[in-house]
Amino acid sequence: MRLSLGREDFSTLPGWAEDRPAAAFAAFRRSAAHATTIRSYRTGSLGLSHAEFQPAYAAALAQSTSESGYLPDAEARSFFETWFRPVAVTPLDDDGLVTGYYEPEVAVSSTPESGYRFPFLRKPENLIKVPDPENPPAGIPAGHAFMLAGADSTDCCPDRQAIESGAFDGKGLEIAWASSRVDVFFAHIQGCARLCFADGRIERITYAAKSGHPFTGIGGLLVKRGEISADTVSMSSIRKWLADHPEQSEKLMWENRSFIFFEKAAVENDFLGPVAAAKVPLEPGRSLAVDRHIHTFGTPIFVSAPELEDFDEPRPFARLMIAQDTGTAIVGPARGDLFAGCGSEAGEKAGSIKASARFVILAPVGSEIARRAGHEQ
C-alpha cells in the first residue's frame, strides 16, 4: 500500500463548512455504541486503533441528542472538530474513486408461483469459511473465502451458473422467489434487499456468505466488448443492456461466478439501511463501504468528489461519511462505496455514482496518524 498522509485543517477544508453532518454524527454514535459495548473493531493497516477512538466514542455516547439520536448540524460539526484532526489519504499509484450502492426493494412470492421462479437462497449448512484463504485446504483455490465441508473432505462451492441451474435444488434453501433474475442478480451486487410480498409484508435479507468464486463486474465486461462506452456505464445502462438482450443476459450474468447467500433480518427502522459489516444499521447518505483491510470501521471520512452532485443539494459532493461497510470490489485507501438509501429513488442515485474522489480521514486527537501528518507536535 503506497500512500501519503497530509495535514488538513477544518478551517480550510473545501466543503467542510457547507456540509450538514448531523446524520454523520448519528451514524458515528451507533458505531461507538457497538465498539464500546459489544465488540471493538479490528484495526486496519492505517493503524487507527480502538484505544485511539475511545475518547471520541465516550464523548459521542455522553452527548445529549434528540430522541432520534440526531444533533443540530452546528453541534455535530463542533463535535468532530473537537475530537478529530483531518488527514488527507492520497494513494500514490492511482486516483481515489467513489461509486454508490443501495438497498433494493423486490416484489416476491413465498412460493414458486407462476411468474415467480428466481429464488433468493440462504446459506447451506455445510458452507464454511476457509480458515486461511491464502493457504487453503487441498482442492480449494487460493483466495476462496468459503468452501463446502464434507464428512471427510472439503470441496469448492458451485459457482453462479451451477447454483442457478439447480445445484442446491431440494435443499430447502429458498427464502422467497422473485419474478426477475436481473432483480436477484442486482440484489447480489448490493448484498441486501427488502422483499415485498403481495400481502403487504416486508422482510429484509442481508449478506450471509458467498460461493467463494471471484467477483467479476459485468459492466467492465460490457465496456471491454464495446457494448457500453466507459463514459456511460452505470447500473442503469447495464440494466438496460440486460433488458435489451434477454437471450444473452443470463450467460453474461453467469460470467460473474460469485454468488451471494442471504439471511433474514428485521426491518426495525424504515429509514435506516441493513445492518452491514460494521454491525450497525447503515445511515443513508452517510455510511461508506471501505477496504476493511486498510480502514478501521467507525472512522469518519470526509469525501469530496467535485464531478459528483451532492445527494440533497445542488452543489459538488463534499460530505462526512462513516466507514461502516465493505465490499469485494472496494480495494485501496481512497476507494469507497456511498450508501444512498433504500428503494428505487436511492437506486437511481446509486446507479449514477462513479467519480474521482479525495479522502480525508478524521483521525482521533492524539492518534499516531494525526501526529505523523503534522498535528499536535
Image (cartoon, rainbow, N blue to C red):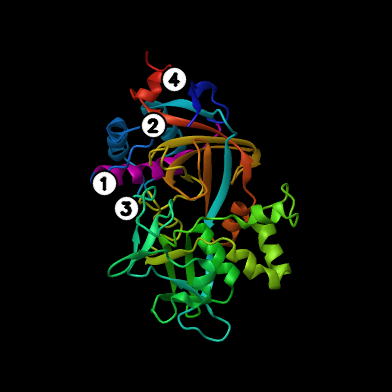
Q: What is the three-letter code of the residue carrying label 3?
A: Pro
**Is 161 located above or below residue 224 in the figure?**
below
Front residue of 30/186: it is 186
- Please state the extent of the stretch shown in magenta in the rendering: 18-36
**In this rendering, would 218 be left or right of 342?**
right
Q: Secondary structure at mark 1?
A: loop
Q: CA distance from mark 3 to mark 1?
A: 21 Å
In the rendered structure, find residue 372 and report the number of the disc placed on it: none
Q: Which residue is mark 4?
A: 373
Q: Is residue 376 or residue 73 the one in the foreground?
A: 376
> Which residue was labeled with disc 1?
39
Asked if residue 126 lies left or right of residue 87, the reply is left
Q: Are marks 4 and 1 in contact (CB under 8 Å)?
A: no
- Quadrant in the rendering for residue 371: top left
- Of the two numbered discs 4 and 2 in the rendering, the one whose residue sits closer to the viewer: 4
Report the amino acid beneath label 2: Phe
Residue drawn 64% across the image and 64% down it: 252
> Is residue 35 located in the magenta-colored stretch of the structure?
yes
Gap in angstroms between the C-alphas marked 3 and 2: 40 Å
How far is disc 2 from disc 1 in space, using C-alphas?
A: 23 Å
The residue pinned by badge 2 equals 79
